[in-house]
Image: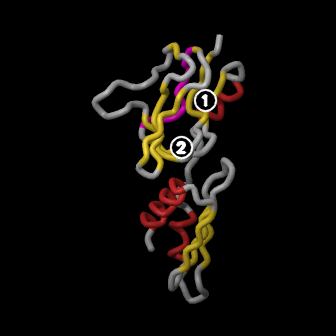
Amino acid sequence: MDLKEIQNLIKFVAKSGASEVKLEMEDIKITIKTGDGENTTIVQQMPMGTPMMAAAPVAAAPTPVVAEEAVASRDDDSKYITVKSPIIGTFYRKPSPDKPNFAEVGQTIAEGDVLCIIEAMKLFNEIESEVSGKIVKILVDDASPVEFDQPLFLVDPS
């Protein structure tokens, strides 16, 4: 199993919503665990006769990381309301490629306005605003995966 297949497996498990998956093959054991906002973790155990070269690329495999600017902005933007993802899936800012975005920075929104779509297992879920206000920041890039309870938008309620 090469690095690309392992990365695809991590993405599949993250999208599926499973909390833990174990995979055992002839010469490799992989455990993928997802938790409450924690990064995906890979543990690989090789049999004694297997060369160590195979383990090096897996140890360097990137895991989903929260955007640095989102972490930094949490401290500065405490007066804003954070709209969070209710599900795991893929975040989309517009209903289709040829349509305009649901929401833009600086736009005034009302309670019940659709802010984005999150695709989960081929189902497209409209995410509606629970607050009225002005969008200050969009914290997620279009067509990127999101986790449960991950911040998506900052809204100024005043």
Q: Amino acid at mark 1?
A: Val
Query: Label for residue 105?
Result: none
In the picture, measured across the screen, residue 88 lies left or right of residue 71, that is left
What residue range appears in magenta?
A: 134-142
Residue 47 vertical placement versus 117 (above, below): below
- Tag 2: amino acid: Val
Q: Which residue is disc 1 drawn over?
A: 83
How packed mark 2 is, by other alpha carbons closer than 10 Å (few <14, some 14-19, many 20 or more), is many
Q: Nearer the viewer, residue 27 or 10?
A: 10
Examine the image and state in which quarter residue 92 appears.
top left
Of all residues, the one furthest to the front in this rendering is 112
- On screen, residue 117 versus residue 40, left or right, reads left
Q: CA distance from mark 2 to mark 1?
A: 13 Å
Give SS at disc 1.
strand
Location of residue 12 with respect to 64 vertically, above or below: below
The residue wearing badge 2 is 146
Q: Is residue 44 left or right of residue 6?
A: right
Q: Earlier in the sequence, mark 2 or mark 1?
A: 1
How many other residues sit within 10 Å of disc 1, few (<14), some (14-19) or many (≥20)?
A: many
Residue 30: percent from left, percent from top: 57, 72
Q: Residue at x 50, y 22 (%)?
A: 113
Q: Residue at x 52, y 84 (%)?
A: 27
Would you place residue 130 above or below residue 120 in this image?
above
Q: Residue at x 65, y 10 (%)?
A: 158
**Which image quarter: residue 82?**
top right
Image quadrant in which you'd find residue 14: bottom right
Q: Which image quarter is the N terminus in?
A: bottom left
- Compared with 107, 3 (above or below) is below
Q: Residue at horizontal 60%, vertical 57%?
A: 40
